[in-house]
Image (cartoon, coloured by chain):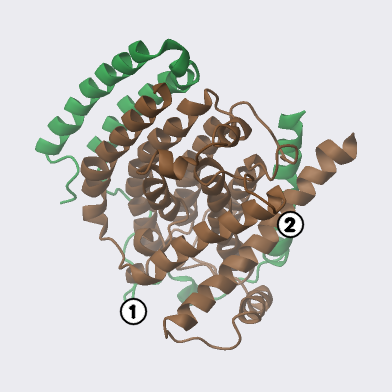
Chain colours: A brown, B green
């Protein structure tokens, strides 16, 4: 019982987190190589070498930072990613934590991510990091509603807030086809929650690295790891609620989920490499005036579809 | 039991993350003060970073609160939606329509602009 309910779930989440974060780094480098961008070393070894290098470097210090918060913020972000991954069902029986309120908990992970990223930028006591943090709050408060409406949309046909039920409700047709607006909107949310590519407002290069501009050495490694892990957790949730999770012919369930997660990751990382960064002053208007009404449409669509 | 598992997963990840940062958490070597000045592209800061900052988007955060409260009603609504049918649809439609007027008003007032 201890093995089935404590050790196995913990090992699953840890493995998914570690392998997933490595896969994100490798995939991103492979994409950069395929697009002809500069790439040093082998795509498979470079992330490991970079990680080992960061581990041996000394961590930067600013004048009078908020020490506890500064060191804790990457850990908390990593923890949020782990909570997200724990909710993802790998098959009908293999779920780390099969909560009846998975959708609500994932919503709280997205909301708390804003708090943690702000904490990371605020605690360094450096102007550029703080500006990145304030920018991220504007973005985080804008995308959270889109995410919630889209997720409520997938809960309607399932008549439940449980991810396993949401997957079971997609047995005939996946939500990506049933609710065509859902996945594109949710992918934008994914770029927001891990502030990746076009929505990288917190750690953008115009702020010399934003919230991470004063962070180096092991804390930087923890932060980069946490961002990649959050991307993995998000891809797991997206594959679960829109791409039918473990459902699929011939192959075993967990393998299907991994394939679908890779598809989501590929889409996100390609978007991160191909799309320019959104300017922060336009982002709030875009989210509230264009994308939020679109998520209303998605919800109404999902509701009508569920009733038919 | 699920919550206990979740708690243990969170604890294990926290410990793993702490282990990565352990050398810095335990014994941080402090560089000299000029090196510890925050990066400002060559300039030196003349104020503390934590001074008053005008958060231009604060009216948007107030608008968010209205919608966040609405989400609270929406979670139970989603579970009983199919059972209640068209009536639930209409009710939430009206609720959303009223809130959307708020978005239009805020848009007109320039809440989403950042100047």
Chain hosting mark 1: B
Same-chain status of marks 2 and 1: no
Check disc 1 and report the residue beneath it: B42
Q: Give the mark toward the camera: 2 or 1.
A: 2
B86 and A238: which is toward the camera: B86
Check disc 2 and report the residue beneath it: A15
Which residue is located at x 64 percent, y 45 percent?
Answer: A246
Check the image and name the residue furthest to the left: B108
Q: Is residue A71 left or right of residue B82?
A: right
Which residue is located at x 55 percent, y 27 percent?
Answer: A161
Mark 2 lies on a secondary structure that is: helix
Which residue is located at x 64 percent, y 61 percent?
Answer: A20
Relative image position of residue A116 (x, y in whole percent) = 51, 47
Crowd tier of the residue under label 2, counting other residues whose Cα lies within 10 Å: few below 14, some 14–19, many 20 or above: few
Distance CA(mark 2)–CA(mark 1): 43 Å
Relative image position of residue B82 (x, y in whole percent) = 45, 18
Crowd tier of the residue under label 1, counting other residues whose Cα lies within 10 Å: few below 14, some 14–19, many 20 or above: few
Relative image position of residue B73 (x, y in whole percent) = 41, 18
A233 and A64: which is toward the camera: A233
Q: Is residue A171 left or right of residue B111?
A: right
Classify the position of the N terminus of chain B by image quarter: top right
Relative image position of residue A213 (x, y in whole percent) = 45, 68
Q: Quadrant of residue B32?
A: bottom right
Q: Quadrant of residue B29?
A: bottom right
Above or below, comparing residue A73 to residue B24 in the picture:
above
A245 and A221: which is toward the camera: A245
Q: Is residue A208 visible?
A: no
């Amino acid at each position: 019982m201890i093995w089935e309910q404590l050790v196995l779930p913990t090992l699953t989440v840890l493995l998914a987190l570690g392998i997933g974060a490595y896969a994100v780094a490798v995939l991103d480098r492979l994409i950069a190589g395929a697009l002809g961008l500069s790439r040093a070393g082998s795509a498979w070894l470079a992330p490991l070498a970079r990680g080992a290098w960061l581990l041996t470097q000394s961590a930067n210090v600013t004048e009078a930072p908020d020490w506890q918060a500064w060191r804790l913020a990457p850990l908390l972000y990593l923890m949020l990613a782990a909570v997200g991954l724990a909710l993802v069902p790998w098959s009908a029986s293999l779920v780390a934590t099969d909560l009846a309120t998975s959708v609500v908990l994932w919503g709280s992970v997205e909301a708390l991510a804003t708090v943690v990223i702000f904490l990371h930028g605020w605690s360094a006591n450096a102007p550029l990091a703080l500006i990145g943090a304030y920018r991220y709050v504007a973005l985080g408060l804008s995308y959270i509603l889109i995410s919630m409406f889209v997720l409520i949309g997938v809960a309607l046909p399932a008549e439940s807030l449980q991810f396993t039920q949401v997957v079971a409700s997609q047995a005939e047709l996946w939500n990506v086809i049933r609710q065509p607006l859902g996945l594109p909107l949710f992918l934008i949310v994914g770029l927001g929650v891990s502030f990746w590519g076009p929505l990288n407002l917190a750690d953008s290069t115009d702020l010399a690295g934003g919230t991470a501009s004063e962070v180096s050495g092991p804390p930087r490694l923890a932060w980069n790891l946490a961002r990649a892990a959050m991307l993995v957790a998000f891809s797991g949730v997206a594959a679960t609620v829109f791409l039918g999770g473990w459902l699929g012919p011939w192959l075993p369930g967990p393998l299907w989920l991994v394939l679908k997660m890779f598809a989501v990751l590929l889409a996100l990382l390609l978007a991160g490499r191909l799309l320019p960064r959104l300017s922060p002053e336009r982002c709030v208007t875009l989210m509230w005036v264009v994308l939020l009404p679109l998520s209303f449409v998605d919800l109404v669509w999902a509701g009508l579809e569920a009733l038919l | 039991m699920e919550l206990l598992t979740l708690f243990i997963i969170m604890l294990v990840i926290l410990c793993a993350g702490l282990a990565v940062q352990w050398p810095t958490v335990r014994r941080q070597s402090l560089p000299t003060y000029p090196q510890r000045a925050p990066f400002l592209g060559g300039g030196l800061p003349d104020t503390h970073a934590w001074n008053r900052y005008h958060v231009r988007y604060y009216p948007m955060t107030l608008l968010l609160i209205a919608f966040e409260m609405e989400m609270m009603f929406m979670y139970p609504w989603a579970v009983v939606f199919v059972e209640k049918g068209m009536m639930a649809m209409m009710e939430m439609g009206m609720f959303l329509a009223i809130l959307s007027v708020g978005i239009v008003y805020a848009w007109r007032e320039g809440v989403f602009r950042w100047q």
